[in-house]
Image: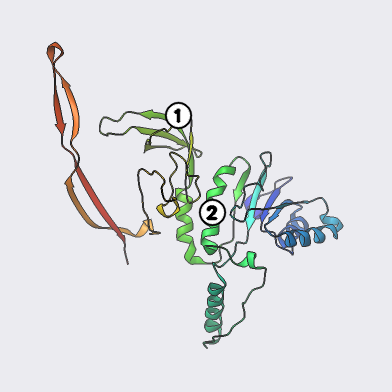
Amino acid sequence: MADLLGERENTTCLDVGVGANCIYPVLGISEYNWDFIASDINTDSIDSAKEIIKSNPTLKGKVKFRLQKDKNNIFKTVIKPKDKIDVTICNPPFHSSKKEAMRGSMRKVRNLTGKRSKKVKLNFAGMANELICEGGEKQFIQNMISESVNYAENCLWFTTLVSNEKNLNRIYSSLENIEAAEVKTIEYDPNRSAFIARLKTDYGNWAYILAPQDLQIGQRIESGERAPIEVGNALPLRKIPIGSIIHNIKNNYDLDKKKLIIDEVYANEGPKLKRIRPRAQGRAYKILKPTCHITIVVKESS
């Protein structure tokens, strides 16, 4: 982490889920003299961490504690509008349930001893909220990626520990897909029955999307797991509430984009587009322009 930031003065680090032992702020202050913002969803953990800082004179005044009152949020309400943060760090919850945690411990015992055991103790310690969350490590980090877009002006680097290598492909996919953008123009495309919107992303890239009804020039739109349910935003189908009006559907079923192959291709008749061709002396006649649908079915290669 220190190599990533280089020799920066007045470095501020946000520790997401500081925990009762406050270990990362203690190390960061002792080794690099960083300032810290420390967040947690548990009041007991915050109180314990405060006592550790209070009892060490060299740590006093170096840590600001912020309680996250909504367990469904990570950065929201913790990062303030005027905050300038150099880096965030996080040791996310590993598992989605206690049962999954026990299976992991049993697997490690079997790998180390070569013996199967139905009764094992968890091979790590911590409070329930530090070890387990809905969706486990993968979902927690995906939520973090989605929220980070809203705080690009407040923080330079967003980082996290990833304990399970199997989660990396999905995390990389989320990083590729999550961007916020501003609608610059809404344009007519003679080859489509819908308007298209030209977007400029926060990274300076340009892109086009089909323009849904009521999309406005200057509007900011987002793409990702936790994008708000608003016109123009893109989310996986499983995250869209029943009854929502949707457009431009894309269903990925958690497939790895790098392993996709074409499984089936077919074409059938599409709608006939009504057009008018003007003629001399105010006359005109109707044209029915035929179209076709091309369907491409993909699957993940084995």
On residue 17, the disc is none
Relative to 66, does residue 167 appear above or below in the rendering? below
Residue situated furthest top in the rendering: 281
Relative to 239, does residue 102 appear above or below in the rendering? below
**Sequence-wise first label, 1 or 2:** 2
On residue 217, the disc is 1
Left or right: 50 in relation to 209: right
The chosen color scheme is: rainbow
Please tell me which residue is depicted at 21% across the width and 45% down the height of the picture: 293
- Residue sitting nearer the eye, 139 or 25: 139
Kind of residue at disc 1: Ile
Please tell me which residue is depicted at 54% across the width and 45% down the height of the picture: 149
Circles 1 and 2, Cβ within 8 Å, touching? The answer is no
Q: Can you tell which quarter of the image residue 131 is in?
A: bottom right
Quadrant in which the C terminus is drawn = bottom left
Residue situated furthest front in the rendering: 243
Query: What is the spatial separation of the Cα atoms under label 1 and label 2, in whole angstroms?
Result: 28 Å
Please tell me which residue is depicted at 52% across the width and 59% down the height of the picture: 139
Please tell me which residue is depicted at 59% across the width and 43% down the height of the picture: 151
Residue 300 pos. (x, y %): 33, 62
Residue 3 pos. (x, y %): 64, 54
How many numbered markers are drawn?
2
Kind of element beneath mark 1: loop
Left or right: 80 in relation to 164: right
Q: Residues within 10 Å of mark 1 (few under 14, many from 20)?
A: some
Residue situated furthest bottom in the rendering: 115
- Residue sitting nearer the eye, 288 or 205: 288
| Residue tagged 2 | 143
Relative to 103, does residue 161 appear above or below in the rendering? above
Residue 274 pos. (x, y %): 19, 30
